[in-house]
Amino acid sequence: MDGSRSTLSGIPLEPVYGEGPFPGEYPYTRGVHADMYRSRLWTMRMFAGFGTATDTNGRFRELLRSGSTGLSTAFDMPTLMGRDSDHPWSLGEVGRAGVAVDSVEDMADLFAEIDLGGVSTSMTINGPAAILLAMYVVVAEQGGVERGRLAGTLQNDILKEYQAQKEYIFPPRPSVRLVTDVIRFTATEMPRWNPVSVSGYHIREAGSTAVQELAFTLANGFAYVEAAVAAGLPVDIFAPRLSFFFNSHVDFFEEIGKFRAARRIWARWLRDRYGATDERSLKLRFHTQTAGVSLTAQQPETNIARVALQALAGVLGGTQSLHTDSHDEALALPSEAAARTALRTQQVIAHETGVTGVADPLGGSAYVEWMTDEVERRAEEVFAHLDEIGGGSILEGVYEGIQSGWFMGEIAESAYRFEREVNAGDRIVVGVNAFTEGNGSTGTDLLRVGQETEDDQLARLTAVRAGRDSDAVATALGRVAAEAADPDLNLMPSLIEAVEARATVGEIVEVLEGVFGTYVETAVV
Amino acid sequence: MVGTGLPIRVVLAKLGLDGHDRGLKVVARMLRDAGMEVVYLGLRQTTGSILNAVEQEDADVVGISMHNAGHLTLGPRIVSALADAGLDVPVVIGGIVPDVDLAELEAAGVAAVLGPGAPVDEVVSTVRAVAGHDGSD
């Protein structure tokens, strides 16, 4: 008995109800696949990373044993910023908020005893993304898995870093060149790899509204399309592998409208503005993560309910993969028990609620269709603004919006408006400004990462540096510098060579900074 | 509480690599709306750059925002750096700080910790309390 084909009472279900265009049909408002979750559930992909590579490897294997169907790597702040663990900035940050990776040897430990040919891996990394991809390729090939078989996603979305998450290294234009280098490399050598995950998640977490999240993210997606086309790649060669990453926040129907509008906008723009003809280029596929910022430190068990509702919105919105936040994330990185509860939440939605039986079950609802149209209309106003300030180019409009601080100002304004509404009591946050009985001391079973992790990682880095051929490192870094200076060359081959020689993330980044420069943001409140 | 006739001057900064600046920006606006003078240093500040700003801006309070779990390492360092420089300026930490760390931070001389969801009244009154004056005459 397949629970997705009939109700608990035994009422048989059709795969879809209502009117066309149906799921799987242009403009894909109702979903990218005809059968949606009947034929294939979303990928349950839990984001994890802390301590040393060996620590995180243990969590990865636990998640796979518990029924996770994909891996998702959280790197620590020094790695995200392209700094080695012994850089002065890294003090106190090694392995604290993600896993520390300095060299390819750490990457090998991270994926030890995991079949890289059989799992899909997401890596949340942006500034030094190309370097980490090079490490993953080297580790896989040393383990006998060819790069062409590797499946996964590199976040590699640098534009939203300037706008929201602030993990940039180089200035925007050379950074976008690195993005297009990765797009070109994977298009020819890694056909199962998504080279960019265009991410609204961080824009939303930084305080934007749902409409801003949608509009800024899709604008960044259009910008990468324009950059890759300008670099000489035909749109249908790379667009099918662009993927997206959205937040699922607490406003249930607004989120569902956002996901549906995202697919429709992307399909229309790719077809009409960028001339894509391959159907796969038009289909917006996305990962969803529940809203970390909506989690409360007060009465943290309440977060289990928030996460379940947000995850359900993602599923009703047609997501392709999902991370559910752990209820202790307003206090620390997830403990193993909390992460398991979060995964179980997805499994309840997938296997018990019956929502997987019918594609786009809310399609045709007057409210949901209106919301979808309204979110789309408001997003189009943002595209028109960026097109105008970019002189007919969304890519130039995005650069201009970054340089002038427009994106950051818009996001900060929305964040402050929300905070004022909560403070005035106009918006209720359970446990924070209402229903506060039961608020007490929290956090006895939290994940702790201590100073010993930093000490271990520093010892490991010293050993890697001592055990390598320093002439080979210098030669490889020299090649990286030379090829970085020539924008017509793809940097991926020289990065792979440098990584193989055991050059560290920080060493490679410093060489690139020598050519590209370093970005410093003007602080805007 | 004594008045000095001068507005409270607060230096706000993100210490270290962490780029989560939503909360600090909201706090900056809260404090400005409450009549304080805010010197917003922004991201990737070091102990040295914060020290310079405190000295040059004659700050009454330093506010550090941390979401990277590095507070036990970096919090005490900024407190002792201020003390070593002879600057008697209280440090308030905001962000993700588990309750179990509060005693250690207090022992290290951190004046106050503001957690996620701290309402505007608590933020403003905490800064006023540690500043030692309320900005009035």
Image (cartoon, helix red, strand yellow):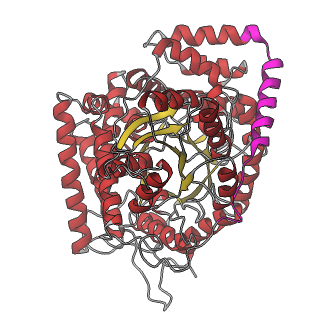
User: Would residue A320 be visible to someone looking at this image?
Assistant: no
Front position in the image: A71 or A458:
A458
Front position in the image: B122 or A1:
B122
Q: Position of residue A265 (x, y in %)?
A: 26, 50
Q: Residue furthest bottom?
A: A9
Tell me what residue is drawn at x 57 percent, y 35 percent.
B16
Is residue A212 a member of the stretch shown in magenta? no
User: Would residue A447 be visible to someone looking at this image?
Assistant: yes
Classify the position of the N terminus of chain A by image quarter: bottom right
Is residue A452 a member of the stretch shown in magenta? yes
Tell me what residue is drawn at x 41 percent, y 56 percent.
B124
Q: Quadrant of residue A75?
A: top right
Front position in the image: B28 or A78:
B28
Left or right: residue A498 versus residue A450 is left
Tell me what residue is drawn at x 80 percent, y 36 percent.
A456
Q: Position of residue A189 (x, y in %)?
A: 55, 29
Magenta stretch secondary structure, dominant: helix
Q: Is residue A405 above or below residue B34?
A: above
Start and end of the magenta stretch? A443-472
